[in-house]
Image (cartoon, grey):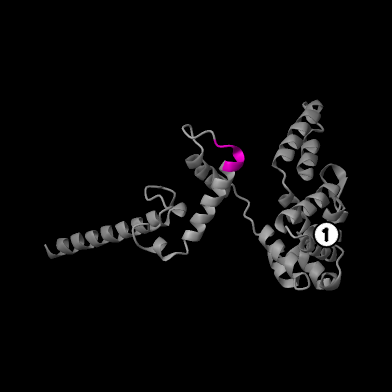
Amino acid sequence: MDNMVGEIKDVMKDNKYAGYFEEINQIVLARWDKMSIPLHCLGHALNPRFYDKHYLQQLAPNNVKRKAPNLDVEVANGVIEAFKKIREDEEEQSMLRAQFATFHMKKGIFSRTAAQADAVTMDAVDWWGTYGSETPELAEVAKKVLSQPISSSLAERNWSTYSYIHNVKRNRLNCDRADKLVFIHSNIRLQSRFLESYKSGPHKKWDMNLESTYIEGSSAHLEEMVWENLVEEDVDNRKGKRARLN
């Protein structure tokens, strides 16, 4: 976000709309405050490439000096809040904070030249899988956080589920109750996929929309299309065989 604001300022510097930068900046920051959650800060703080000394020596857009995530007050507060949400037990939170200190201060295995070199060239999840042995709990958290796909598909799926729970006729549910029902519904759906009744029987693939044109979201529809193609190919082969015989 800081890079984006800096780039906007660089672009508008010699632009006829340069006088509107402050207004645009306020709009962008307001949107950021609305979107930002502690998990974003944790993902940023657990990415090893942002601690690389060569990266930190380079100036950010608008000639702003870079700083390591642990030295940014907003990020540091977000990390602590994220640890509170991930682990309810105070001892476990303290353990994660201690392991995070070991990581960003580059102690133990993190001080090795190979670890610091691979932090720039290696994928962050692979890096934690390789060098996270001294901080196993933090490494597990890092791999889960950094593996999150940058996509709105999961949010769209939640909104789709939400529409079944809160609608025009059923609109007196408060936000907390509706959110809990969406959470329960989504998790029951995921758990049900491991049951035998999901694979066969009257409730087979109950959450799949057979009439959906979205192939990836409906494996049942995909299987149906594959079967139809096989049938069509068989019919075409028979027609070709009859034509040759005639």
How many marks are shown on the rendered structure? 1
Instruction: Name the residue furthest left.
Output: 246
Q: For the residue labelled by badge 1, is the local secondary structure a helix, a strand or a loop?
A: helix
Q: Does the magenta segment cover residue 175?
A: yes
What is the quadrant of the C terminus in the image? bottom left
| Horizontal and vertical percent position of residue 20 | 78, 27
Foreground residue among 205 and 172: 172
User: In this rendering, would 16 be left or right of 146?
Assistant: right
Q: Is residue 15 visible?
A: no
For residue 161, above or below residue 21: below
| Horizontal and vertical percent position of residue 135 | 77, 69
Foreground residue among 183 and 130: 183
User: In this rendering, would 87 be left or right of 100?
Assistant: left
Residue drawn at x 41%, y 61% is: 198
Instruction: Look at the image and give the residue range highlighted in magenta.
Output: 173-177
Foreground residue among 46 and 113: 46
Residue drawn at x 19%, y 62% is: 238
What is the quadrant of the N terminus in the image? top right
| Horizontal and vertical percent position of residue 132 | 75, 70
Residue type at tag 1: Tyr
User: In this rendering, would 92 be left or right of 174?
Assistant: right
| Horizontal and vertical percent position of residue 76 | 83, 52
Label 1, residues with CA under 10 Å away: few <14, some 14-19, many ≥20: many
For residue 228, above or below residue 155: below
Write down the residue under mark 1. 51
Q: Does the magenta segment cover residue 171?
A: no
Residue drawn at x 34%, y 61% is: 201
For residue 109, above or below residue 1: below
Q: Is residue 87 visible?
A: yes
Q: Quadrant of residue 110?
A: bottom right
Classified by dominant secondary structure, the portion drawn in magenta counts as helix
